[in-house]
Amino acid sequence: MGLYVCARSWNGKLLPDARASLDNTAVLWHYVAAQGLVGMGVIYLMPLI
């Protein structure tokens, strides 16, 4: 997704009023970060259960 947004920016197709690519990339980035934190929490808490 990051490369896609960079490619659109380099070609001049990433406009301030059309933010769908940036918003979707941000949503995906936050989901992946949250999923990673939850996964690490589950792995570290598993021996305690």
Image (tube, rainbow, N blue to C red):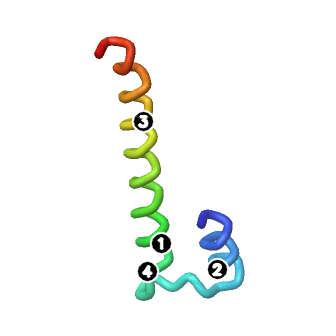
Residue sitting at 46 percent across and 51 percent down? Answer: 32
Q: Circle 2 sits in a helix, a strand or a loop, which is it?
A: helix
Contact check, label 4 and label 1, Cβ < 8 Å: yes
Q: What's the amino acid at mark 3?
A: Gly
- The residue closer to the viewer here, 12 or 28, is 28
Tell me the residue that label 3 is attached to. 39
Who comes first in sequence, dot 1 or dot 3?
A: 1
SS at mark 4 in the image? loop
Q: Residue under label 4, please give it.
A: 19
Residue kind at label 4, given as amino acid type: Arg
Around disc 2, counting alpha carbons within 10 Å, would you say few (fewer than 14), some (14 to 19), or many (20 or more)? some
Q: Pick out the residue farthest to the front.
A: 49
- Tell me the tag on residue 40: none
Quadrant (top left, top right, bottom left, bottom right) of the N terminus: bottom right
- Residue at the disc numbered 2: 8
Question: Amino acid under label 1?
Answer: Leu
- For label 4, the crowd category at 10 Å Cα-Cα, with few meaning under 14, some 14 to 19 and many 20 or more, is few
Q: CA distance from mark 4 to mark 3?
A: 30 Å
